[in-house]
Image (tube, helix red, strand yellow):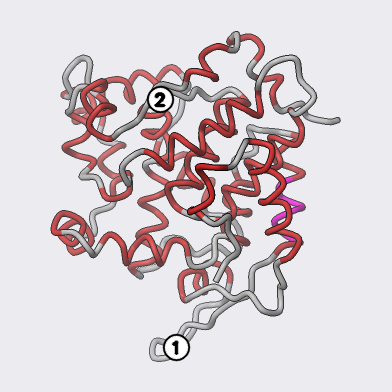
Amino acid sequence: MQPSIPLSSCKKMTHASFLIQTLFALKAASPMAMTADALDAPMHRQAAPANTRLPKPRLQWGAALKALQRLLNDKEDTGQVFEIMRALNGASTANCYQRLLTTTQGGRIAYQREEFADRLMDEAWLDSLPAGSVGAAYREFIRSEQLSAEGLAEVSRIQGNEIDIAHPYAWMGRRTRDVHDIWHILSGYHRDGLGEACLVAFSYAQTKGLGWALIALGAASRSRRADYPYVKAIWQGYKRGKAAAWLLGEDYERLMAEPLETARKRLGITPPTIYDSIPAEARDAAVPARM
C-alpha cells in the first residue's frame, strides 16, 4: 500500500501541514516494504509469458526524485511526469479501475474500453462540439497551445513503460493520461508553472497517485518564499480536487458536449480563486527553475 495523507484529517490541515505530512510520508516509506499491485508490472518490466502472474514491483524512489529534479528545472519536459508516475503511482491506477467498476456507467465504460485519445484526435468530432461546451473550450485550448492527445501519448511511451499493452490497468492509465488536458479546462488551471502545480495537486486528490503528490510537494517547496500565495493556490488545488466528483468515472463523450459552467456545477468544481488572484505574468515564477 502506498503512503498517503489520511483523508480523514485533510479538512483540518493547513497548506503548510499538508506539505510537512506529505514529506514525512515520503521519508518514512520503506522501499523494501512497499509494493505496487499488478498495475505497474507491465509498465517497467520485460513482457512475461502469457500465463505468468504479474509481479508486484517496488516503488522506485530514486528514479522518481531524479525525474522530479529534471521536471522542476524544465516544466515542459513532460516525459519526467510519466517517469514519476511509473515509479511511484503503485496501485493507484488499479484501484481507480476497480472503482470504475462499482457504478453502472463506469462498468459500461470499462466493458467498452474505448481509447479516448482516438476520439480526441478526430478533428471533425471536435469541430462538431457546440460553442460554450467543455469540448469547445478543449478544442480552443489544444489548438492555441499546439497540443494533441497523440502528442501526449507519444511522450508517455518512455523507455520501459509499456503503456500500450492490452491490459485493463494499462487502459485505465491511458484513460487518465488522455483526460489530463480536459482537467485543465474543468479546473480552470492554465499551462503556466503554477497552473500545472495546482492541477497535479488536484489530480492527487482525484487519483491518490503518490507521483502527483510528489510533484505538488516539489513545486510548493520551490515557491514557498515567493511574494504571491503560490503554496496556498497549490493547496487549494488539492482541496478542490477532493471536493469535486470523481472525474475518472465520467462519460467523456457526453461531458465534452455539456456546457462548461453547467459541467463544473454538476461536478462540484469550485472556482480557483487563489490561482485567479495571482497575475498571469507572475504564475510561471511559481516554480523557479533553480533555487
In whole angstroms, how far apart are the C-alphas of marks 1 and 2? 40 Å
Q: Would you say the residues marked 1 and 2 are in contact, meaning their CB atoms lie under 8 Å apart?
A: no
Q: Residue at x 28, y 52 (%)?
A: 115
Which x, y percent locates residue 77? 65, 38
Query: Is 1 situated left or right of 226 in this image?
Result: left
Q: Main secondary structure of the magenta part?
A: helix
Tell me if residue 169 comes above or below residue 241 in the rendering: below
Tell me if residue 233 comes above or below residue 32 in the rendering: above
Residue 143 occupies quadrant: top left
Q: Amino acid at mark 1?
A: Arg
To which residue does mark 2 refer?
142
Q: Residue furthest front?
A: 12
To which residue does mark 1 refer?
53
Magenta-drawn segment? 62-68
Residue in front for this viewpoint, 81 or 246 = 246
Q: Residue at x 72, y 62 (%)?
A: 61
